[in-house]
């Protein structure tokens, strides 16, 4: 691809990346929401699935948050979203609504999103 900037031609070569498959196991708050989006759209990664766990919020909330993020970010519908473990194997889990809000997304204005709602297919 050639681009002209201030009269100079610049050649940009698209780098071919080998895609590495990634499965995210997460408790979506802000950090995991960003991780999901990065994993889905980074040229060297292929997001092959997402599972949820209790953590920032309850398992119901974290699972709902994945569906919200997937819908808003336009993730393709073939990426599986799996409801995971609702308790810790090692210690008692304490969610932190005072930090992460009742939704787990820190008060982000994200409307309710029913699980399984159709997501957009990624083109390309």
Image (cartoon, grey):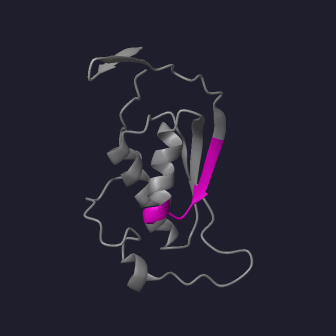
Above or below 17: residue 51? below
Q: Residue at x 56, y 49 (%)?
A: 50
Q: Quadrant of residue 92?
A: bottom right
Which residue is at the far right?
90
* Residue drawn 46% across the image and 20% down it: 12
**Which quarter shows the N terminus?**
top left
Measuring 49% from the left and 73% from the top, which residue is drawn there? Answer: 58
Residue lying at 59% horizontally and 22% vertically, measured from the top left: 16
- Residue 24 painted magenta: yes
Residue 103 lies, with reference to residue 74, above or below; the image says: below
Image position, residue 88 (x, y; %): 67, 75
Q: Is residue 14 above or below residue 48?
A: above
Question: On the image, which quarter does residue 44 sit in?
Answer: top right
The percent coordinates of residue 107 (x first, y second) are: 30, 72
Magenta-colored span: 22-31
Horizontal and vertical percent for residue 71?
35, 45
Say left or right for 23 vs 100: right
- Residue 94 is covered by the magenta coloring: no
Residue at the far front in the pictured view:
7
Where does the image place residue 10, in percent across and percent down from the top left? Answer: 40, 19
């Amino acid at each position: 691809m050639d681009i002209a900037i201030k009269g100079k031609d610049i050649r940009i070569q698209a780098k071919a990346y080998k895609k590495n498959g990634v499965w995210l196991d997460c408790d979506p708050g802000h950090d995991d929401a960003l991780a999901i989006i990065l994993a889905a759209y980074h040229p060297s990664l292929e997001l092959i699935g997402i599972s949820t766990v209790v953590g920032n919020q309850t398992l119901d909330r974290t699972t709902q948050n994945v569906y919200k993020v997937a819908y808003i970010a336009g993730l393709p519908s073939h990426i599986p979203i799996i409801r995971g473990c609702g308790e810790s194997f090692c210690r008692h889990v304490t969610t932190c609504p005072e930090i992460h809000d009742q939704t787990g997304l820190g008060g982000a204005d994200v409307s309710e999103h029913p699980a399984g709602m159709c997501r957009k297919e990624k083109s390309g």
